[in-house]
Image (tube, rainbow, N blue to C red):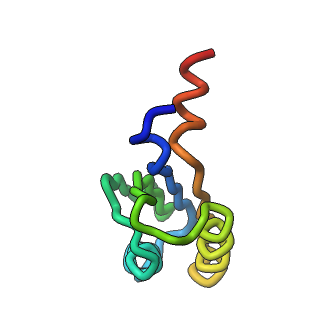
Amino acid sequence: MTNKSKNTAVITVVGRDRVGIIAGVAGLLASRQINIKDISQTILDDVFTMIMLVDLAGSRFDIKELAGCLDALGSDLGVSIRIQHADIFDAMHRI
C-alpha cells in the first residue's frame, strides 16, 4: 500500500436524481475536513451516479465513522452512499 492510497478513499453514490445530492455529500465531507480530489457524476435516465476520490489525511474521523455518516445522509437523500479505502482497489490489481 502506498502512502497516497493510505489516505485515499472511493465514495460511490447511486439513486434517483434529485436536487441537493452533490451539495449534501460535499457539505458533509467539507465539515469533516475531507478534500475531494476527483469527481465523476452522470445521470442515466433519472438515475444519479457519482464516484469521488477523496483525501482523508486532514480528517480526524475514521472510515467506519464516515461510512455511518454517509449512510445516514444517503437515507436522508434517498440514495446509496458507500466508502472504501483505495488500497482495496490496489490489492485487487495485485492478485
Residue at coordinates 35% horizontally, 52% vertically from top-left? 40
Q: Is residue 62 left or right of residue 45?
A: right
Tally the numbered discs.
0
Residue at coordinates 64% horizontally, 66% vertically from top-left? 67
Q: Please state which of residues 19 and 25 is positioned toward the viewer in this rendering.
A: 25
Instruction: Name above or below for residue 8 compared with residue 75.
Output: above
Q: Is residue 22 left or right of residue 90?
A: left
Instruction: Name above or below for residue 38 compared with residue 69.
Output: above
Instruction: Name above or below for residue 29 compared with residue 82.
Output: below
Residue 70: horizontal and vertical position, in percent? 59, 71
* Quadrant of the image containing the C terminus: top right
Q: Return the residue found at the far top.
A: 95
Residue 6: horizontal and vertical position, in percent? 49, 44
Q: Please state which of residues 30 and 58 is positioned toward the viewer in this rendering.
A: 58
Q: Please state which of residues 29 and 5 is positioned toward the viewer in this rendering.
A: 5
Residue at coordinates 37% horizontally, 56% vertically from top-left? 42
Residue 48: horizontal and vertical position, in percent? 47, 62
Residue 64: horizontal and vertical position, in percent? 68, 63
Residue at coordinates 46% horizontally, 50% vertically from top-left? 7
Q: Please state which of residues 18 and 56 is positioned toward the viewer in this rendering.
A: 56
Q: Is residue 9 left or right of residue 53?
A: right
